[in-house]
Amino acid sequence: MYSAVVLEHCEHPRNAGDLPDATNTVNVTNPVCGDELRLAVRIENGRIAAARFRTRGCKAAIASASLLTELIVGKTIEEIRHITAEQISQALGGLPAATRHGSQLAEDALDEILEQL
């Protein structure tokens, strides 16, 4: 059901944990399935210098959050504005329709970070 990329991100999530010196932190929840995602970033000189996440949810949610942190680190604020749930899903090898909410949760967290800026 899941691609090898999704399984790899679940077994070896990137940037999982807390970011004590975060400049921005958000918590988002999918009210339908109950998945939760906390995304923290540190912004320096207009770029994402570091990103960490904590999530409670399905494999798609974990993999999407892990991939999102990889996508945004080193990017400018303007560059991360263009990241979508569909791009996250595609980068994970295409999430099945029933689990696409995982990539949407990641996009929702990113959107909330951007709203804080």
Image (spheres, rainbow, N blue to C red):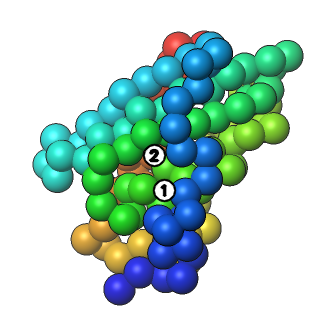
Query: Would residue 29 appear left or right of 63 to someone viewing this image?
Result: left
Measured as percent of width and height from the top left, residue 88 is found at 55, 59
Query: Tag on residue 106?
Result: 2
Dot 2, crowdedness within 10 Å: few (<14), some or many (≥20)?
Answer: many
Per the image, label 1 sits on a secondary structure element best described as helix
Query: Measuring 38% from the left and 44% from the top, which residue is drawn there?
Result: 55
Toward the right, the furthest residue is: 45
Query: Measuring 16% from the left and 41% from the top, which residue is drawn there?
Result: 31
Q: In this rendered view, identify the residue nearer to me: 5 or 117.
A: 5
Q: Residue 52's quadrant in the figure?
A: top right
User: Is 73 rendered above or below residue 68?
Assistant: above
Q: Do the numbered discs 2 and 1 sit on residues whose CB atoms are within 8 Å?
A: yes
Query: Tag on residue 64?
Result: 1
Instruction: Name the kind of residue labelled 2 in the image.
Output: Ala
Query: Would residue 116 appear left or right of 58 to someone viewing this image?
Result: right
Query: Measuring 43% from the left and 24% from the top, which residue is drawn there?
Result: 26
Q: Residue 19's quadrant in the figure?
A: top right
User: Is 18 rendered above or below residue 85?
Assistant: above
